[in-house]
Amino acid sequence: MQRQQVLMGQLMDLTNELVWLNRPEMQSALEGYKLNEIELLEKIGLLTHPNVTKLANATYMTRGAISKLTKKLMEKELITSYQLPENKKEIYFRLTTQGEHINQTHQMLHQRFANRDKEVFTNMTDEEFDTVFRFIGRYREHLKKLPKSR
């Protein structure tokens, strides 16, 4: 159990350190936008025909929270809604030009951080990557099996 606690502590510390290090630049470049707004814009930009259900699944938020957030993003003119001709019941979302600009700024920051941290990954072997991927995959599968409290 001791090694498990140390590993989880190290992962939490790493995550917190990255957030602490990246936060000032993110806040400066994306001033006036909340993290959940920026992340939702990213998902809308990535998914094919994103709707409330797809976005809830992709962001680990409730459908109610996604509905509120998409309404807010529409008021800020960062996204618009649309329907497909063959399915007038379902509502989908797409980025506006302004939403696309925010998303591109966010992606540029991610790339800048990745370039900054590249040296950590340069000397990792395929075996080391595979070990980390296996661990993360097993852990995520375990978490998926747990009862949802939402």
Image: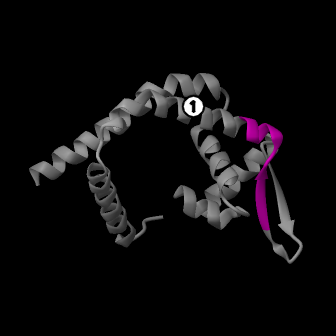
Q: Picture coordinates of residue 119 (x, y %)?
A: 36, 30
Query: How many numbered marks appear?
Result: 1
Q: Is residue 54 above or below residue 17?
A: below
Q: Is residue 45 above or below residue 29?
A: below
- The residue depicted at 60 percent of the width and 22 percent of the height is 28
Residue lying farthest left?
2
- The residue depicted at 64 percent of the width and 43 percent of the height is 37
Q: What element does badge 1 sit on? A: helix
**Disc 1 residue type (three-letter):** Leu
- For residue 108, side relative to residue 92 (left or right): left
Q: Nearer the viewer, residue 56 or 50?
A: 50
Q: Nearer the viewer, residue 18 or 76?
A: 18
- The residue depicted at 63 percent of the width and 65 percent of the height is 54
Q: Which residues are magenta?
A: 91-101
Locate residue 18: give its quadrant.
top left
Which color scheme does this rendered protein use? one colour
According to the image, label 1 marks what residue? 109
Q: Picture coordinates of residue 110 (x, y %)?
A: 54, 35
- For residue 122, side relative to residue 35 (left or right): left
- The residue depicted at 42 percent of the width and 68 percent of the height is 148
**Label 1: how many Cα within 10 Å (few below 14, some 14–19, many 20+):** some
Q: Picture coordinates of residue 1 (x, y %)?
A: 11, 55
Q: Is residue 65 above or below residue 72?
A: below
Q: Is residue 83 rendered magenta in the image?
A: no
Residue lying farthest bottom?
86
